[in-house]
Amino acid sequence: MGCDFESNVLVQANRGTSLVTLSKTQLLALIGGAATNMAFFRITLLRSAIGLPRRSTDVLKALGLKKRMATVFHAVSPSVAGQVMKVKELVQVEECQYRLTKQEVHLERKPDPGYYLEQSATEQRSS
């Protein structure tokens, strides 16, 4: 249960009934050493999976994509990159530095109103 930073010894901690095993890099990431450099995949489903093999639809479910134009964020990892490659024709992928909330994604997609109020009618009458 010790921690040896000089070698690649696995650190084990007993959490309730399950045993958690962390490598040296994962432990440093938890402490905060590598957490500042974390990048995310921003994955948006552009095309529907209707009529495609079940394997493709299962990959989309695993990524958390259910509807067209839905956006999810996943930490950059080889497993997520492999899943994206399975459905690359259906999705748009961008790499970003931080994860956006659902509201921030909505405001990003909200169109411009097309006009701006310089002065309201009540302010015009009082002047």
Image (cartoon, rainbow, N blue to C red):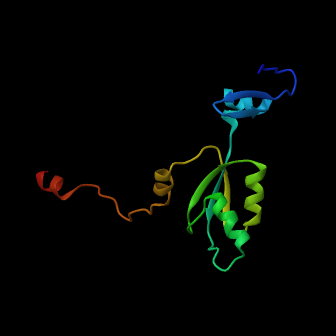
Q: Which residue is painted at 56% across and 63% down in the image?
A: 70
Image quadrant holding the N terminus, namely: top right
Looking at the image, which residue sits at the far front?
A: 17
Residue name at image x 64 percent, y 74 percent: 49
Residue 90 visible to the viewer: no
All told, the count of numbered labels is 0
Residue 4: quarter of image: top right
Q: Nearer the viewer, residue 111 or 47?
A: 47
- Residue farthest along the right direction in this orientation: 7
| Most distant residue in the bottom direction | 51
Examine the image and state in which quarter residue 39 appears. Answer: top right
- State whether residue 111 appears in this view: yes
Q: Position of residue 50 (x, y in %)?
A: 63, 78
Residue 124 in the image, given as x and y percentages of width and height: 17, 55
Left or right of residue 114: residue 48: right
- In this rendered view, identify the residue nearer to me: 59 or 35: 59
User: Looking at the picture, how far across and down is residue 62, in whole percent?
Assistant: 66, 59
- Residue depicted at x 17% and y 52%: 123
State whether residue 122 is above or below residue 75. below
Q: At which x and y percent is residue 25? A: 78, 32
Quarter assignment of residue 2: top right
Say whether residue 3 is left or right of residue 35.
Answer: right
Residue at the image position 44 percent from the left and 63 percent from the top: 111
